[in-house]
């Protein structure tokens, strides 16, 4: 690590309350002191999507706080981003934030499921999966403790209204498209 760069812990301690005020928590901080100029990447997540305006506001406030640290010598590049779609879902909050998204799930018994994240409550996930008939959807309860891996899937087509309603509990979920 380059001399003068703060540690991961220092960055988190410095920025945590600012991100929390905006409704986000810092998931990770990556510091690359070998890059020219050095790069500090702050990965944040929250119950609402991290849009470009929010990223810009968080970047400005984070830069102001980091620039005030006397030990940082020279310049650095700051990047604020979300965890990305390929991040595994590993905690109840990740599943809660992914509600309505399509996921591939591997269970401890070797079962593989593909479905849409529904309600998460009391350590259990409601996963909306295809029923016996190709057009039917059913809600499959899954204990979070039985999930070995869960990855959000990239979708190129709009899901059915029935599927989205079961996952989100919103009767108008399919009416205006997904964001």
Image (spheres, helix red, strand yellow):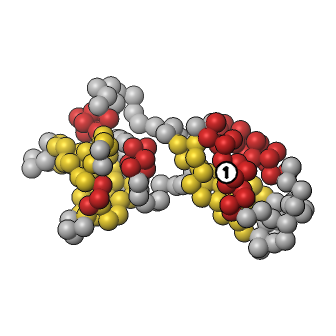
Outermost residue to the left: 132
Say which element carries label 1.
strand
The answer to whether residue 21 is above or below residue 6 is: above
The x, y position of residue 71, in whole percent, is 87, 61
User: Which residue occupies the foreground of this view, 179 or 123?
Assistant: 123
Tell me which residue sits at (72%, 58%) in the image: 10
**Res 55 seen here:** no
Q: Is residue 16 left or right of residue 89?
A: right
Q: Residue at x 73, y 50 (%)?
A: 14
| Image point (67%, 54%), residue name | 12
Which residue is denoted by mark 1 in the rendering? 80
Left or right: 6 in relation to 83: right
Residue 132 or 10: which is nearer the viewer? Answer: 10
Give coordinates of residue 31: x percent, y percent. Answer: 71, 65
Residue 37, image quadrant: bottom right
Between 12 and 86, the one nearer to me in the picture? 12
Residue 97 is left or right of residue 162, and the answer is right
In the rendered picture of this protein, how many numbered marks are placed on residues? 1
Residue 158: x and y in percent read 34, 41
């Amino acid at each position: 690590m380059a001399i003068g760069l703060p540690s991961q812990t220092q960055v988190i301690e410095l920025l945590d309350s600012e991100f929390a005020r905006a409704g986000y928590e810092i998931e990770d901080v990556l510091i690359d002191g070998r890059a020219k100029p050095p790069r500090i990447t702050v990965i944040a997540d929250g119950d609402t999507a991290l849009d470009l305006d929010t990223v810009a506001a968080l970047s400005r406030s984070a830069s102001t706080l980091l620039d005030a640290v006397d030990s940082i010598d020279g310049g650095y590049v700051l990047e604020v981003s979300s965890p990305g779609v390929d991040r595994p879902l590993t905690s109840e909050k990740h599943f809660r934030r992914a509600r309505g998204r399509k996921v591939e799930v591997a269970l401890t018994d070797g079962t593989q499921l593909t479905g849409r994240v529904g309600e998460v409550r009391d350590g259990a996930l409601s996963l909306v999966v295809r029923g016996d008939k190709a057009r039917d959807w059913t809600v499959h309860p899954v204990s979070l403790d039985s999930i070995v891996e869960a990855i959000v899937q990239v979708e190129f087509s709009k899901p059915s209204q029935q599927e989205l309603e079961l996952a989100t509990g919103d009767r108008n979920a399919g009416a205006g498209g997904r964001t």
